[in-house]
Each structure stands twice: as C-alpha cells, then as structure tokens.
Amino acid sequence: MREMSMRIAVLSDIHSNNVALNACIEYIDDNEVDGIIFLGDNISDCPDPQDTLSLIKQLDERYQTWHINGNREEYFIKHADGEEPFNRWTYSSEKGSLLYTYENLTKEDIECFRTRNNKEIVFINGTLPITIAHGSPGLTRELLYANQENTDKYLESLDTDYLLCGHSHKQFAYSKYGKLLINPGSVGVAIGVKEQAHMAMLEWNNEESVWKYQLLSIPYDFEKLCEIFYQSEIMEKAKLWPKLIMKSIETGINYAPICAKAAYDLAVQAGETVGWFGIPEKYWQEAARTILF
C-alpha cells in the first residue's frame, strides 16, 4: 500500500478516441488514482462521441474530477447558438467531422459544456493549487511551447506555481520563474509517438511540498480503432479528415493541420478568397494526395 498522498491523473484532447481512453482508464484504475483533471477537447475527430461522454460520466461517478472546456466544446456551443461562421458547417473534409460530432450530441451535452469555464484553479486540501487551461490561461486556441515568449509571459504572471495546458498534442514539461508548465499530451491523437495515448500523473510529495509528475505513453489497439472508424458514418460525412486523423495516430505526425494548411495555401494560390472556413474540397484532395495516397 502506498503512503498517504494525493495522486491525480491528467487527461487532455481525448478527441473521441474511446480505444485510447479505455486504455488510460485501465491504467488509472490500476494505479490508485484519487482524482482526474480533464483539460478539454474531449470529443470530435474520432467516431462515437456519446461513448466518450458516457465513459467520462462513469469516471465522474467513481473519482473526484475537474473539467474545463477546450476549443472544440466552445465550437459546439457556438454552433448550437447559430453563431457565424460556426453555423455554416457542411459535410466536407474541412468541417464534416465537427458536424458529425454535433449531430451526435444532445441538448443536455451542450448545456453541460456551458456550465464549464475555460480556466480554473484546482484547490486540493494539503497541496499547492494548480491552474488548468486548454490552450493557455488567456485563449483556448493559443499554443504554449517551451522557451517561447508567450509561454514565459504566462508563467511570469501566473498566480499559482503550476499550470496544466493541452491543445498542442505535444507532451512536455517546462519550468521558469519558479513555475512549472505541464502539457500531458493528447489521449486521442498523440504527437511524437505511434499508436499510443499520452497522459500525465501528478503526485503530491509531502516531504518537499511539491507536485511531482510523470509523463506517460499508454499503448492501445490501433487496428481496433481503425475498424471503428470504417464502420462509422464519419468516413462519409468528414471525407478526408478521419483518414488524416488515423494517419496522424499511426505515425505520430500531426497530418490533419498540415493538410489543412496546405489546402489553404493551394486555394490562396488559385485566387480563392478563403479563411478558417470555406476551403473548397478540391484543394483538400490535392493537398492530401502526397500524404495519404
């Protein structure tokens, strides 16, 4: 039996990858965890978001949990509210995955997202508080990396000694100004490893009065995940996007945004007026040709 201490699992960017999530849950159940922090982007990109939400609800019942929204949860709230341009999603490589996911959510799911903040401070008796955010304490879509100016500014002004962020899918830890930033990586679409899930574990050290951390890679059955993809409507509704997600998981290279940027560049070169929305499908097909085919 371990000495009395507090052990917290940190999960981010699950992206509806239920095979990976189940592998992480098995690890959590086997390692005497006291609570779980979720950093958002629980759904989208992979099939069966209701299964993801059901698994998370079961964890809410069995463990103390803390939740914040990621940018994806924000998108679904904005789509539900008819906000431009989120109300213009179509079945396409660009936004078909988001539309598929939204169609598999309930009103209750959206209302649950509305109750959550984009940033929180986690207080656990007998330990030091932890700031949690998805991208950064300022923006859900902001990327924080080690040795970057924006990262250092956030750490310098941080009200706590610890910051947990996700969004980049890049697992790392970085310390500056006596503050520690931990990105647990992505459960669902981990970058830098092949066919594995990333997560983190925090354990309070009573003697030193600090949080110790582990960055973990959890293997899972990638072939089973692919079978779930090919049995899902997401393959038709989201066109190339699910293939890019599977390729990203298989290789550990974040091909989905790489292809999106290439499609955008091709559209601009062709004289198209495009932004974050509205890249014609033909440019996605052209951009993906060297990645997938």
Image (spheres, rainbow, N blue to C red):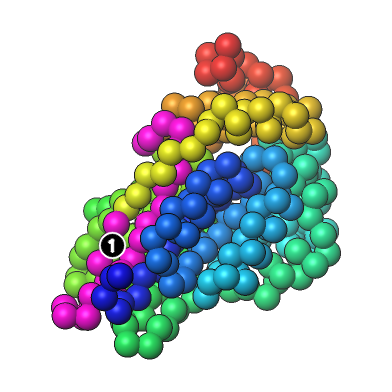
Q: Position of residue 248 (x, y in %)?
A: 50, 31
Q: Is residue 255 visible?
A: no
Indicate the quadrant containing the C terminus: top left, top right, bottom left or bottom right.
Answer: top right
Where is mark 1, residue-wise?
213
Q: Position of residue 271 (x, y in %)?
A: 66, 25
What's the magenta region? 192-214
Q: Position of residue 151 (x, y in %)?
A: 32, 60
**Dominant SS in magenta:** strand
Check the image and report above or below for 121 versus 84. Answer: below
Q: Mark 1: which amino acid?
A: Tyr
Q: Residue at x 52, y 63 (%)?
A: 38
Q: Is residue 79 visible?
A: yes
In reply to whether residue 205 is colored magenta, the answer given is yes
Q: Residue at x 50, y 46 (%)?
A: 23
Q: Residue furthest top?
A: 293
Check the image and report above or below for 138 versus 29. Answer: below
Q: Secondary structure at mark 1?
A: strand
Check the image and report above or below for 90 versus 206. Answer: above
